[in-house]
Amino acid sequence: MKSLDAEALCRQLADQLRPHVTPATALVGIYTGGLWLAERLHAELGIAQPLGAIDVSFYRDDYGSKGLHASPQKTAIPFNVDGAHVILVDDVLYTGRTTRAALNELFDFGRPGVVELAVLVDRGSRELPVAARYCAHTLSEALPREQNLELQRDDAGQFTLKLTERA
Amino acid sequence: MRHPQLNQHGELQHLLTLDGLPRDILTAILDTAAPFTEVAEREVKKLPLLRGKSVFNLFFENSTRTRTTFEIAAKRLSADVVNLNINTSSAAKGESLLDTVDNLCAMQADMFVVRHAASGAPMLIAQHLHNTGRDHIRVVNAGDGRHAHPTQGLLDMYTIRHFKQDFSNLTVAIVGDVLHSRVARSQIAALTTLGVPEVRVIGPRTLLPTAVDKLGVRVFHDMREGLKGVDVVMMLRLQNERMNGALLPTPQEYYKIWGLTAEKLALAKPDAIVMHPGPMNRGVEIDSAVADGAQAVILPQVTFGIAVRMAVMSMLGSH
């Protein structure tokens, strides 16, 4: 995989989103990388609705086998979900299971009008019928299972994409 | 020997006592409880973690608050909850505790929440489950005799952390009938494990265990002396139902010496919080003006209790 410029991809994603943002549009970031990205987009696009955050720990489908994720964070949806135009934001789209969990959680707050998905990178290997409407980069070849791709943020707030081997 | 409530990986398998529970597990439970507090504000107050699991509330002793909050916690985690009112069940007809457990296991129980007048009953059940090859079934102690009430101790720690942020510079006083109190034992274990530098125990000699100072606490027999400069006042209920013989004068006299009044509370720090595990005896261990006053956090304790019990059950419920 050639190295990816996370900052450039973030600008591209903002450009894709800009024409579709209305005063009613709300962003919800998925912990942790997706929330960093959503914070950036929220400021850059001048989103009027307050930013939402979802931690999918309580909705994961591997809880039975893997147990509860360590130190889950508070989910916060500070706007009225009923009828809302919601864009879920995540750093990397992979199996689609995180998106499924986030959708289930979102619907426990109300019935949104439209939900869309925005991601920085699509790494392939989908296991559920999930697609991102906004995606800055799709890998030409799916990453192998033993590799992990995630967004990192340094102390200055700069984004990088980090590829690691799974332990 | 490993702690019987931990599995071979050092993870929590049952919750039986806070005594000897490692600090990182205690802290992990408190950290996990925090996001559960938010669920109560949702339109759908339910999470799918224990979907399809059966939780049996096995209460051999009366309880309103604990049984109800365990039930709410299990239901908010989507478990099926069965409440057994033992007074009207087979135990009243002579069935043994372990026969009751075996029968409920035959009904595919996944978790037992146990309250019993005998210290060690939840441990006995956990050992029985292990000896009969049923390690997948979890046991949560909801109060056994004078021994332990771990989820009460945990929700008290959650409450202290919520209002005081940090344990490392606190002075905490536990006041009243420590002798009969499983709550006090769990509180002392948790406070010392979490690094509270000074834990005080305040009460009459007849209501303090003989070697209470061995638990690492400072003992006071003068309430005014003991309350000076404390950050947290944890009141205990006077447990008349557990007393045999004349340990006490009249409730009125007890109130005069050991009841928490505004005048006595003024000796604590101005921002001290007042806690009580409930049920309260107003006018015995606590004055109504204090119980309903600005420093009381007694009702937040109840609300936090739900989140803490959700955290415990969800940490036990997987594997």
Image: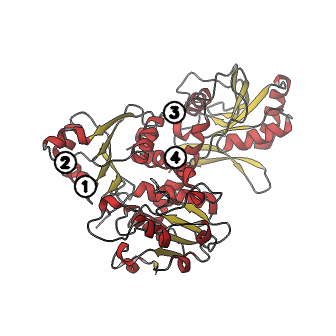
Of labels 4 and 1, earlier in sequence is 1
Residue B304: x and y in percent read 54, 49
Relative to the observer, which residue lies in front, B286 or B82?
B286
For the residues beneath circles 4 and 2, the answer to whether they share a chain is yes
Q: Which of the 4 image quarters holds residue A31?
A: top right
- Looking at the rendered structure, the kind of residue marked 2 is Leu
Q: Which residue is mark 4?
A: B307
Of labels 2 and 3, earlier in sequence is 3
For the residues beneath circles 3 and 4, the answer to whether they share a chain is yes
Classify mark 4: residues with Cα within 10 Å, few (<14), some (14-19) or many (20+).
many
Report the chain holding disc 3. Answer: B
- Looking at the rendered structure, the kind of residue marked 4 is Ala
Of labels 3 and 4, earlier in sequence is 3
For the residues beneath circles 4 and 1, the answer to whether they share a chain is yes
Foreground label between 1 and 3: 1
Relative to the observer, which residue lies in front, A83 or B56?
B56
Q: Quadrant of the N terminus of chain A?
A: top right
Residue A17 is tagged as none
- Looking at the rendered structure, the kind of residue marked 3 is Lys
Residue in view at x 84 percent, y 32 percent? A48
Left or right for B315, reference A123? left
Q: Which residue is mark 1?
A: B121
CA separation, marks 3 and 4?
12 Å
Relative to the observer, which residue lies in front, B129 or B163?
B163
CA separation, marks 2 and 3?
32 Å
CA separation, marks 4 and 2?
29 Å
Q: Which residue is mark 3?
A: B46
Q: Which residue is mark 2?
A: B97
Classify mark 1: residues with Cα within 10 Å, few (<14), some (14-19) or many (20+).
many
